Amino acid sequence: MPNQEQAELRMLVARLRNEHEDFDIAINAMITVGCDQLRVQRMKKKKLAIKDRLTDLEDQIIPDIIA
């Protein structure tokens, strides 16, 4: 994988990690305030989608090595 492409993927991973953390903070705040459970579930679903995307991108950056 070319260095430029790998650098772009790493930047995207960093942005998604920040977004994932922001969702986590928002979800905890919503639970503390007593927000509607449906909204909390939707936020958790979005957070999970971000985590799945992160996993896919990290796999592209560091491929599995069969030993």
Image: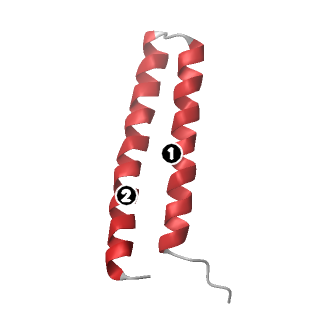
Amino acid type for the residue under numbered disc 2: Leu
> Residue reaching furthest right?
67
Query: What mark, if any, has residue 61 been given in the picture?
Result: none
User: Judging from the image, what secondary structure is the residue with disc 2 in?
Assistant: helix
Question: What residue is pinned by disc 2?
Answer: 12
Q: In which quarter of the image is residue 40?
A: top right
- Local crowd at mark 2 within 10 Å, few (<14), some, or many (≥20)? some
What residue sits 34% from the left and 81% below the top?
Answer: 3
In the image, residue 5 sits, relative to residue 20, either above or below, namely below
Amino acid type for the residue under numbered disc 1: Ile
The number of discs equals 2
Camera-side residue of 18 and 9? 9
Tell me where residue 62 appears, x and y as whole percent: 51, 75
Query: What mark, if any, has residue 50 been given in the picture?
Result: 1
- Local crowd at mark 1 within 10 Å, few (<14), some, or many (≥20)? some
How far apart marks 1 and 2 lie (CA) works out to 11 Å
What residue sits 34% from the left and 51% below the top?
Answer: 15
Q: Which of marks 1 and 2 is nearer the N terminus?
A: 2
